[in-house]
Image: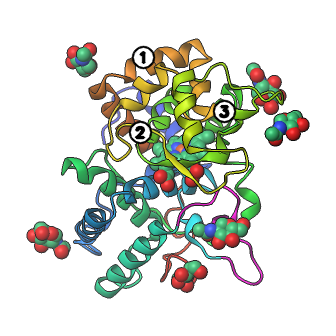
């Protein structure tokens, strides 16, 4: 590279200095990292994921949420996939834990890759790609770019989940803080909450809004009353911990911008969804994202940023042999 001016030199020197202290660590992810070492890796992952989605329409929601939880705890290092052992309670067993169907599929894809290119493709990349591919199945084209080259972490602690995963009971201030801790903005918060256009939630995570919002047997006044009636017919009491309800009532299997449309009708299911309307800046973003074209463009960009959180690269970490077990 030719350096044309002293200001360019200063810029370059700054970049080098930043990288030395690890700030630009995520910069080492790149397009098609396995191009030489396992040329078909991305296609194998896509084919296997699509095959599973044809028989399991709920899989995109499962994988997208697992990917989010992975990235928010210790970075996108597949620490969420580790099984607990007699001496360690892993992330997977924390209270906001995730349904099983996704883990089996990821382990199956990993086994296929181990047969074709042993020791090459990380579980962290498999999860990032499979989450993207599962959501993309509906469109038959990739909905966001996934850079690769992540390696797998060697630590997974149940105790790190609650302090890092936002709660459905959080207000706007707390949600903002949890995202900022990961280098994500309010814009990312609103855009990524759009992930709730697919999937389900358990009654006990919002039934306080239906039955006992302030401890006086009351309803959350910020929840659409007609919608509250519908939710009450499904979640019959405060103690129901097993019933699940679609978060986007009319199209919980379609990845679309309906989340923002219903949110504006005060039909966001969790307090954390409704909280996005309590801040003026966030409310403006919600309005903008009711436009599906805009939502898809913004979601692609925010997912790329989320997929870059705390990635392990170079010679750190490991390439796990099985996603559920540290080598
Ligand atoms: C903003 C903070 C967030 C909070 C408080 C939150 C909370 C929750 C909760 C409580 C559930 C229901 C879990 C259950 O009852 O089984 C859920 C489901 C889900 N979340 Fe989030 N979430 C947040 C952000 C995100 C992000 C950033 C994504 C991905 C981009 C995401 C994707 C999903 C998906 C796809 C589901 C459905 C899972 C399924 O159907 O099994 N969420 N979320
Ligand atoms: C993936 O699926 C396509 C379409 O079925 C097929 O043509 C291709 O060979 C598959 N690729 C791999 C690597 O299995
Ligand atoms: C969720 O955690 C509970 C205990 O905290 C455990 O019994 C259960 O197996 C976990 N579920 C998954 C999917 O790991
Ligand atoms: C948000 O919730 C936290 C914890 O409950 C509380 O301390 C804080 O005052 C709340 N912020 C707002 C603006 O309501
Ligand atoms: C509603 O909340 C109040 C205050 O927390 C509590 O005393 C009461 O038992 C709750 N009601 C029900 C039905 O759980
Ligand atoms: C949605 O956003 C796109 C891209 O910015 C724009 O071209 C289109 O006109 C918008 N549609 C509506 C209905 O506003
Ligand atoms: C992890 O635990 C689950 C549930 O107990 C089990 O089905 C799975 O085979 C385990 N994974 C590995 C790699 O041992």
User: What span is colored magenta in the figure?
Assistant: 84-99
Corner quadrant of residue 316: bottom right
Separation of residues labelled 1 and 3 (CA atoms) = 26 Å
Corner quadrant of residue 30: bottom left
Looking at the rendering, in which quadrant would you find the C terminus?
bottom right
Q: Tell me residue 278's x, y (percent).
A: 62, 17
* Residue 86 in the image: above or below residue 76: below
Residue 89 among those drawn in magenta: yes
Q: Tell me residue 80's x, y (percent).
A: 58, 64
* Residue 23 in view in this figure: no
* Residue 261 in the image: above or below residue 107: above
Q: Nearer the viewer, mark 1 or mark 2?
A: 2
Separation of residues labelled 3 and 2 (CA atoms) = 21 Å
The secondary element bearing badge 3 is classed as: helix
Q: Tell me residue 73's x, y (percent).
A: 63, 55
Look at mark 1 in the image and give the residue it sits on.
287
Looking at the rendering, in which quadrant would you find the N terminus?
top left
Separation of residues labelled 1 and 2 (CA atoms) = 15 Å
At horizontal 57% and vertical 60% (from top left) the residue drawn is 98
């Amino acid at each position: 590279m030719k350096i044309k001016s002293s200001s360019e030199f200063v810029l370059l020197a700054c970049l080098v200095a930043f990288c030395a202290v690890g700030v630009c660590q995520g910069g080492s992810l790149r397009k098609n990292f396995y191009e030489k070492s396992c040329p078909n890796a991305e296609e194998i992952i896509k084919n296997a994921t699509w095959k599973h989605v044809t028989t399991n329409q709920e899989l995109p929601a499962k994988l997208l949420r697992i990917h989010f939880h992975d990235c928010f705890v210790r970075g996108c290092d597949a620490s969420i996939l580790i099984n607990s052992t007699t001496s360690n309670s892993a992330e997977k067993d924390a209270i906001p834990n995730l349904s099983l169907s996704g883990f089996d599929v990821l382990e199956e894809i990993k086994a296929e890759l181990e047969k074709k290119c042993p020791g090459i493709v990380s579980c962290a990349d498999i999860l990032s790609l499979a989450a993207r591919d599962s959501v993309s199945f509906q469109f038959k084209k990739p909905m966001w770019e996934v850079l690769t080259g992540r390696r797998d972490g060697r630590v997974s602690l149940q105790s790190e989940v609650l302090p890092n995963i936002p709660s459905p009971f959080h207000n706007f201030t707390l949600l903002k803080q949890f995202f900022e801790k990961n280098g994500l903005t309010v814009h990312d918060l609103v855009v990524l909450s759009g992930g709730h256009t697919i999937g389900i939630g358990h009654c006990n995570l919002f039934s306080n809004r239906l039955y006992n919002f302030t401890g006086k047997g009351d309803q959350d006044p910020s929840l659409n009353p007609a919608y509250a009636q519908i939710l009450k017919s499904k979640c019959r009491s405060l103690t129901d911990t097993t019933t699940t309800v679609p978060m986007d009532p009319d199209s919980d299997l379609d990845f679309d911008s309906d989340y923002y449309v219903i949110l504006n009708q005060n039909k966001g299911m969790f307090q954390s969804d409704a909280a996005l309307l309590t801040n003026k800046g966030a409310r403006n973003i919600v309005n903008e994202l009711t436009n599906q074209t805009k939502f898809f463009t913004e979601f692609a960009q925010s997912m790329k940023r989320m997929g870059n959180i705390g990635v392990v690269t170079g010679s750190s970490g490991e390439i796990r042999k099985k996603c559920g077990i540290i080598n």
